[in-house]
Amino acid sequence: MSINPLLGMRSVFLGMGLLVLTPTVNPTSAGKPSNPSPTEATLQAPSPASQVNSNPKGQKQPLATWECTTSWYGEGFDGQPTATGEIYDMYAITAAHPTLPLGSIVRVTNTRNHRSQVVRINDRGPYVVGRELDVSYEVARRLGFDQSGTAKVRLELLEVPSRLATERRD
């Protein structure tokens, strides 16, 4: 199986960027109310209010945006365990990505008809060269490419789970 070098490099840099953006938790101060110094305040995770655009829809500002080709997966995987351990439901609003942290929230927008859907990454894949995202059948239906099978989409990374939340799952 050959991998496009540019896609691989982009995935590596995206992953490195996510590590920088993921907030860390100081276990000695967890749960203690404090008045953080200016240095500590800059290291803390942004509050949900600071992630909201001033647009009327109140959508979160993306942490990263890129375009890729997506496909969907359905009946053959329905009822099977996902990478998070939950059971895949082809009618759920979920997706698979090869490198984004499990639990990440992304907005997927079909560039052809501009329909969008916010989804949660709960699985790994796709395993087809040239594709970077697999969405559930329901998401493909809502975005209008369930009949064609693939679509060019814009991905907006909205939220990355904290390291503490990821560690709790393990």
Image (cartoon, grey):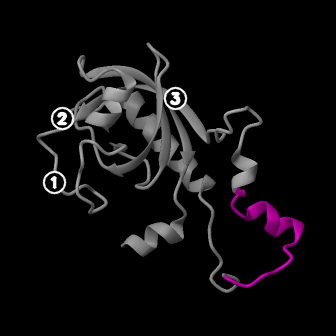
Please, is residue 16 above or below residue 41 in the view?
A: above
Q: Are marks 2 and 3 in contact (CB under 8 Å)?
A: no
Q: Which three-letter amino acid code belongs to the residue tagged 3?
A: Trp
Residue at x 25%, y 55% (from the top left corner): 82
Q: CA distance from mark 2 to mark 3?
A: 24 Å
Q: How many marks?
A: 3
Which is in the foreground here, disc 1 or disc 2?
Answer: 1
Residue under circle 3?
66
Which label was assigned to residue 1?
2
Q: Which three-letter amino acid code belongs to the residue tagged 1?
A: Gln
- Per the rendered image, the range of residues in magenta is 31-47
Question: Would residue 35 be counted in the magenta stretch?
Answer: yes
Please, is residue 50 above or below residue 10 in the view?
A: below
Quick check: 120 left or right of 127? right
Quick check: 126 left or right of 163? left
Please state which of residues 120 and 132 is positioned toward the viewer in this rendering.
120
Q: Which three-letter amino acid code belongs to the residue tagged 2?
A: Met
Q: Are marks 1 and 2 in contact (CB under 8 Å)?
A: no
- Snapshot quadrant of residue 8: top left
